[in-house]
Image (tube, rainbow, N blue to C red):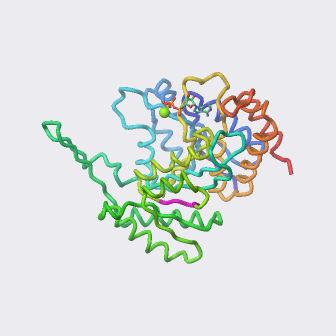
Amino acid sequence: MSQTIAVLKGDGIGPEIMEATLSVLDALDCGLQYEFVDAGLTAQEKHGQPMPADTIAAIRKHRIALKGPLTTPIGSGIASLNVQLRREFDLYANVRPAISFPGTRSRYDNIDLITVRENTEGAYLSEGQSLSEDGETAVSSIRVTRQGSARIVRHAFELAHQRNRKKVTAVHKANIIKTSSGLFLDVAREVAKEYPDIEFQEMIVDNACMQLVMNPHQFDVIVTTNLFGDILSDLCAGLIGGLGLAPGANIGTEAAIFEAVHGSAPDIAGQKLANPCALLLAAADMLDHLGMVEKGTRIRRTIRTVLETARDRVTPDMGGTGTTDTFAEALVTHLHDR
Ligand code: ATP
Ligand code: MG
């Protein structure tokens, strides 16, 4: 069975890193067909709108998208394009693996953890925010639901189960934010009982930050609410040396969108200096999601090999002297190493 995916090259360095990523996917013989659709500034210029209906339709049809970084046109009066996609497809789970690779400037080796962030509720509400008329008092509310908590915690446990992971840590602040964070924690405890083979741990968010910095190897899968997840997933990216190798997935009931965490990097666009690995790692996660786990694993292993052995071919951000294209070529060359 052949699978078609929607491909959004995106803005800035997007087209360059997408080309590199697709060259590796093609060399891997994944049997994927691509439907290329526009979004972001590129779409604004071509079609007069940053998120054309055809793009939404293609994602809806294929249910899987690989997406380069998008720039939301300034002054367009619209919500960020990523937020738009999240709402359109109810992308409730933001899954961000943080895996150490050689040659990165980081404090630790052998980090291998996944943050699962709730993406639709919590403190990220457009409603429930107010500023008093005199401008002296601001109120923002937090909304947590049983259903929203259950599906994100279940997502984390299912992921742990599929990827052979041993432990899920629910991060909360139920001691202080008793209602909303308390409800999340209650639900996490209930859902955890359905997975007796996976260790369940709960941790207060301030302690989790300290523990992540001091002893990150104790963590495996972390599941948490929207705001804490936003902060913790960047903390975890910092543990592996920054955003250069950080992929993300936004998964919902109607679609799953895989992307690099970094932005469009307009400062280096068009110069072939962009590191394609974050997007390629997102593609590897996409292959896992599609059941091609062996191919996803092979991509991660090949990135490791190239970073270790072909420094002259990798991009300057990894300390190399190569370009986006030589990096991709080296990856293709080493893809079938044993
Ligand atoms: P945007 O407005 O799209 O978020 P930005 O410049 O604010 O773009 P990033 O694109 O995340 O933010 O870039 C931050 C810095 O990291 C920039 O200096 C950029 O050149 C660098 N950078 C980001 N992605 C890459 C990459 N894939 N390879 C090399 N450098 C990168
Ligand atoms: Mg940015």
Q: Does residue 185 appear to the left or right of 319 in the view shown?
A: left
Q: Main secondary structure of the magenta part?
A: strand
Is 141 in front, or is 52?
A: 141
Q: Quadrant of the N terminus?
A: bottom right
Determine which quarter of the picture holds residue 329: top right
Using the image as rendered, state which of residue 195 and residue 318 is in the foreground.
Answer: 318
Residue that appears at 75% across and 26% down: 321
Number of numbered discs on residues: 0
Q: Residue furthest front?
A: 214
* Percent of width and height locating residue 164: 65, 66
Q: Residue at x 82, y 42 (%)?
A: 334
- Please tell me which residue lies in front, 314 or 80: 314
| Image coords of residue 77 (percent x, y) | 33, 31
Q: Is residue 317 above or below residue 33?
A: above
On the image, the x and y values in percent for residue 144 come to 34, 60
Q: Please tell me which residue lies in front, 225 or 333.
A: 225
Q: Quadrant of residue 17?
A: top right
For residue 73, side relative to residue 302 (left or right): left
Asked if residue 221 is among those painted magenta in the image, a careful observer would answer yes
Magenta region, residue range: 219-223
Q: Position of residue 162 (x, y in %)?
A: 63, 65
Query: Where is 239 relative to 267, above or below?
Result: below
- The answer to whether residue 265 is above or below residue 231 is above
